[in-house]
Every structure is written in structure tokens, then in C-alpha cells.
Image: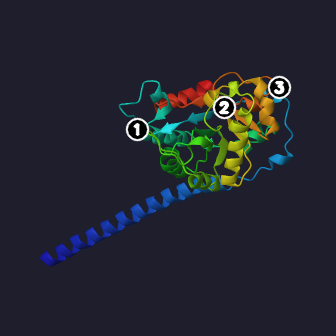
Amino acid sequence: MKYKFLSIISAGIILFTSCQSKSQAENASVQDSTSQTTKNQAETEPAIDVSKIKVADAKTILARKQVPILCYHQVRNWKPTDGKVGKDYIVEIQNFKDQMKMLADSGYHTILPDQLYAYLNTGAKLPSKPIMLTFDDTDMDQFTVVRPTLDKYGYKAVYFIMTVSIGRKGKFVDYMTKEQIKQLSDEGNVIGSHTYDHKNFKKYAGKDWEEQLDKPTKKLEEITGKKMTEFAYPFGLWNAEGIPELKKRGFRMAYQLSTKRDEKDPLFTIRRIIASGYWSPKTLSNSIKNSF
């Protein structure tokens, strides 16, 4: 009787362990499937032939609902040396991960410039709850922290590169290498220009156009093997006089920050908002809704 009782207990333990392992395997399979589905959705977006798109008139573009576009800079934990203003541009690592989870849980889908360009000019359909993620200044954490976080959700982004900093190691922050920038591009992200050394666009004159636009464009095109079509104004500052210079150089769209769009050239004054380091995921969610 004693041995029979022990046999029953042993059988129960084996059965429980088997069921638990099966349940865990099924859960993992579901999670993997969900993750893969998200990635597949991002990877199977049909290519857009933007070369065939005719630029719409300004009134048509301005009438379309704006797509939320977030601007990030550094993604790292705050240091004692970081000032109050500086922290506005530094989103701590866990907070950034929580923000991206909030976007995914809220049903946001990232889009890239080709999709935005097609939508603004032709009204082309966008995924539900579209959003664009942009990262300025070439910081290394955008590769080591941002990239794997976005990959988890099948998200893609636009990286605006300041070419003076490529491959440099700074006192407070390191910067991405040419190889890392190319990898981001090869993986389906978009690389855009953010000038040579962040000089105020409104002050460009003479050789500035060559130093701040032409040379950085050439360098980034050599790195990625792709044409540069997107430009982000340093500090978000722009002037109407400089827009023809961007057009002349083949740029298709340019991104400012939160000021009013130009009534004649809305494609060259696309609005973004800075994702503040002080914002929780909930605050970010509210800011997206209120700003766009």
C-alpha cells in the first residue's frame, strides 16, 4: 500500500511537471509568434516608389492631419553633473523602454519618411495610429540602447547624424561609428543629415552651405550607399530663405521642432516634439495627443 501511494504521488509530480513545461513552452511560443508577427508586419511593408509622387500644393499638405513625430537625443541614466536643462534632453534608460512599451501597448505603428511623404502629398494610407521616432546627434546609446529596444517591437526610426561626431569618444558621451550607422541603415532605418557641427541654420552664409550641407551629405551617402533626402534643423531653428538651398541639394523634407509650419513650404518645416527626460510614459502619451 505504501509503495502504491508513493507511485501515485510520483506519477502526479511527473504529470504536473509535464503540464507546466508544456504550458511554459506554449506561452513562449505565443510570445515568440507575437514578436515575430510584429516584426514581419514591419518587414513586409510594401515599398513606396516616391519618385513617381508629385508634390502637392501647400494648402493640401497643411490640411492633412499631422502625424506625431518624436525627437530624442540621449538615452542614458542621469548623472550628478547633468543640469536641470540638460535632463530635458536625456531620457533615462528604463523610462525610454517604458515609453516604447506604452507606444506598442497603445497600438502605435512607426512609419518612415517615404510613408510620410506619400501621405502628405497623395493622401496614401498609413497604418493605424502612425508615429515617427527620430533621434538626433549620433549618440552611441542610440545604437546600444535604442536599437535593441525598438527591435523588440518591430519599430524603425530616423537617425539624424551630425557628422563631426562620428566615431568620437567624448568626455560625457560617445558617438556612433561609421559601421554602426551603416548597420542601422541596412536594417531598414533611415539616416538623415543633421549638419556637420550643429551650427544654427539661420546663420548660414557663404561656405556654410558647403560645410554644413554638402560635405555631410557626401559623407553620409558614402557610409550608407543611399541618397540623403531628410534634414533636421539644429535646435529646430529654420528660416524661409534657406529652404531653397535644401531643395537645390535634393532634400525632400526637413524637420523643425514645435513652431508653426511654413505656409508655403510645409514639407520643409515638419513639426516634431522633444520627448523630455522629465516625462513619464503617461505624460508622453498625453503630449502626443495634445500636440498633434
Q: Is residue 285 above or below residue 18?
A: above
Q: CA distance from mark 3 to mark 1?
A: 43 Å
Amino acid type at image mark 2 = Tyr
Residue 272, given in percent of the width and then of the height, sits at 63, 30
Question: Looking at the image, which is closer to me, 216 or 55?
Answer: 216
Residue named by callout 2:
233
Q: Mark yes or no: residue 108 visible.
A: no
Front tag of 2 and 1: 2
Q: Is residue 150 above or below residue 65?
A: below
**Residue at image coords 68%, 48%:** 219
Question: Looking at the image, which is closer to me, 261 or 290?
Answer: 261
Front tag of 2 and 3: 2
Residue 45, given in percent of the width and then of the height, sits at 70, 52
**Circle 1: is it few (<14), some (14-19), or many (20+) Cα within 10 Å?**
some
Residue named by callout 1:
77
Amino acid type at image mark 3 = Lys
Residue 106, given in percent of the width and then of the height, sits at 55, 39
The residue sitting at the front extreme is 207
Residue named by callout 3:
59
Q: Give whichever of discs 2 and 1 has the lower sequence position.
A: 1
**Circle 3: is it few (<14), some (14-19), or many (20+) Cα within 10 Å?**
few
